[in-house]
Amino acid sequence: MKFKGKAWKFSADIDTDQIIPARYLNTSDPKELARHCMEDADQQFVNKMKPGDIIVADKNFGCGSSREHAPIAIKAVGVSCVIAKSFARIFYRNSFNMGLPILECPEAVDAIKEGDEVEIDLNSGEIAIMQSQIENRKSQIFKAQAIPPFMQELINTGGLMKWVKKKVKTG
């Protein structure tokens, strides 16, 4: 599975309240959650980003509460993948349960600048920064741990619950 999109950079310790503020948790509708994704970290994020874009963050992304609304909002707004130096463990698990691809790669996070075009290959774990026209930088390739086939199947199916339904139907 491959993704390509523009990078949007965020700092360390972005908690789930910054990803989807608690004031919007009176709904679990993905479209409504998407309208407020990253609102408390960057009020204009949903207006600037395009489907397929990539969030790149420092350490401890998704810390705070264990709400599943956070990866749902990110996925629903159209973010194709999140790359971070590290993730809060519950956010890490919730992301795969909701079908949101995430990768840990500190070296890539340090090298990627906001606005860079990034290409990700989940099968190999490769993260490539495409040549920047602004700075005339050459492409750089980084290696994150590849997503295991079972976890990729969860992502491809749309998350754990859809995967379970599929398995029940097919036996």
Image (tube, rainbow, N blue to C red):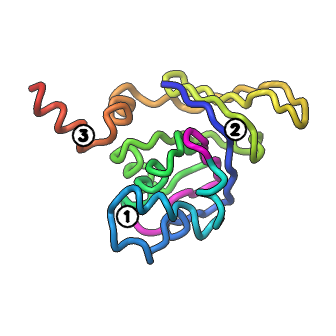
Q: How far across and down, in percent of the image, does residue 138 sit? A: 84, 25
| Residue at image mark 1 | 67
Mark 1 or mark 2, which is nearer to you?
1
Q: Residues within 10 Å of mark 3 (few under 14, many from 20)?
A: some
Q: How far across and down, in percent of the image, does residue 164 sit? A: 19, 38
Q: How many marks?
A: 3
* Position of residue 86 in the picture relative to residue 100 (left or right): right
Q: CA distance from mark 1 to mark 2?
A: 27 Å
Rendered residue at 50%/51% (across/down): 77
| Residue at image mark 2 | 108
Q: Earlier in the sequence, mark 1 or mark 3?
A: 1
- Quarter that holds the C terminus: top left
**Mark 1 is on which residue type?**
Arg
| Residue at image mark 3 | 162
Rendered residue at 55%/27% (across/down): 125
Q: Earlier in the sequence, mark 1 or mark 2?
A: 1
* Range drawn in magenta: 50-67
* Position of residue 159 in the picture relative to residue 83 (left or right): left
